Amino acid sequence: MNDIKERIAAELLAVRDRSLAYTEAEDDLLVRQHSPLMSPLVWDLAHVGNYEELWVLRAAAGIEPIRPEIDDIYDAFKHPRKDRPTLPLLGPAEARRYIEGVRGRVLDVLDAIDLEGADPLHRDGFVFGLVIQHEHQHDETMLATLQLSGQPGLVREGDLPQGRTGGPEEMYVPAGPFMMGTATLAWAYDNERPAHQVDLPAYWIDRLPVGNRAYAAFIEEGGYDDPRWWSAEGWQWRQRSGVSAPLFWVRDGDGWWRRRFGRTEPVPMDEPVQHVSWYEADAYARWAGKRLPTEAEWEKACGWDPRARRARRYPWGEEAPDPARANLGHRAARPAPLGAYPAGASAYGAEQMVGDVWEWTGSWFQPYPGFRAFPYKEYSEVFFGQEYRVLRGGSWAADPAAVRTTFRNWDYPIRRQIFTGFRCARSELV
């Protein structure tokens, strides 16, 4: 049990170091709203502390509120992002003091709590996993905000392995059942549960995410101007928005450049395409004679081991992600080159299915059979329906603590500021 608590303490320290690193900037940058799509960075900073207080200190430990008067300000469901700059937010220094005070009490709770008790918030440290993953998700949101700010020098860079060329374009996934979701991963969210059998016909799925070179060919061949490749809703969005390339791409003569964390650079053609909406991904797939994989197809190709007839936690197995298998945890502020992680391949041979870019799927965000909301409806249940599309896999900005083959992300099909890409699939030819 001490080992589990030591792991939780280490994860709490790591995620807080990350949050503080992304908000180590001039106060003006932290309090400014860089896009109506995003909160001011200082809102995210105080929000993660308030969420931690609500769930660890109040819900799990029964401790009296520290700052109940700020609960409304940092309730993500009461105030849309575009309105948050008008709220009486804690300033940067006060936000840091608040989250530090919360964290000290959280560590005291961790030291005393029984992680083997009957309370489902306590068991296996679920409530700590909840706040750790939540903060990592906001850290990724902070990175998206820093990208939108256009300010250079705020986000660290790093080295990535080289890519490799050659190999098959698609991997074959035979027909048959597999177990989707999980009943065993202690920190999995309610929308990943329960595990249930899904029987799929055979299909092909791209070995790698779609790259910039392939996507540039779609642009050059008039993909954005031909309604044949777009759904009716997608074509309406394309005409209304006027987009003609991924977000942050600009044409310079015959070539493409991109703006990335305050610098302008040539688009690296060997990287997965990034910052595309679901509508753009869907149009590309139609142009390529394919389609986006369903969520079930994506998960089977990523995590199912057909020989052992069981699901893997990661595409390669149970071992934690490392730099040889996946580009996660902000090792560098960009996707890795295509083919950089052969050691991270799934049982079916698909590569780079976790890390690099979130991958759009063709599925709406819906509950699994037997779904039960826990610990609150607003995490998943209120988003179910035909409004949000499912994303899978995790980007370069996602932390391994919040990534697994069963993890489900979701967003509006128009979203492009998040670190999104995709791969294609197609049904088996009869």
Image (spheres, grey):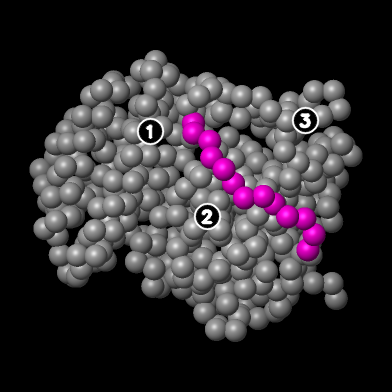
Dividing the picture into quarters, in which one does residue 219 lie? top right
From the top left corner, tell me how far across and down residue 194 is, in percent.
43, 70
Is 158 a magenta residue? Answer: yes
Q: On the rendered structure, is 279 left or right of 318?
A: right
SS category of the residue bearing label 2? loop
User: Disc 3 designates what residue?
Assistant: 256
Sequence order check, earlier mark of 3 and 1: 1
Q: Amino acid at mark 2?
A: Pro
Is 123 a magenta residue? Answer: no
Specify start and end residues of the magenta stretch as a single range: 155-167
Q: Amino acid at mark 1?
A: Ala
Q: On the rendered structure, is 100 left or right of 276?
A: left
User: Disc 2 designates what residue?
Assistant: 323
> Is the C-beta separation of discs 3 and 1 under 8 Å?
no
User: Disc 1 designates what residue?
Assistant: 21
Residue at horizontal 58 percent and vertical 35 percent from the top: 417
Q: How many marks?
A: 3
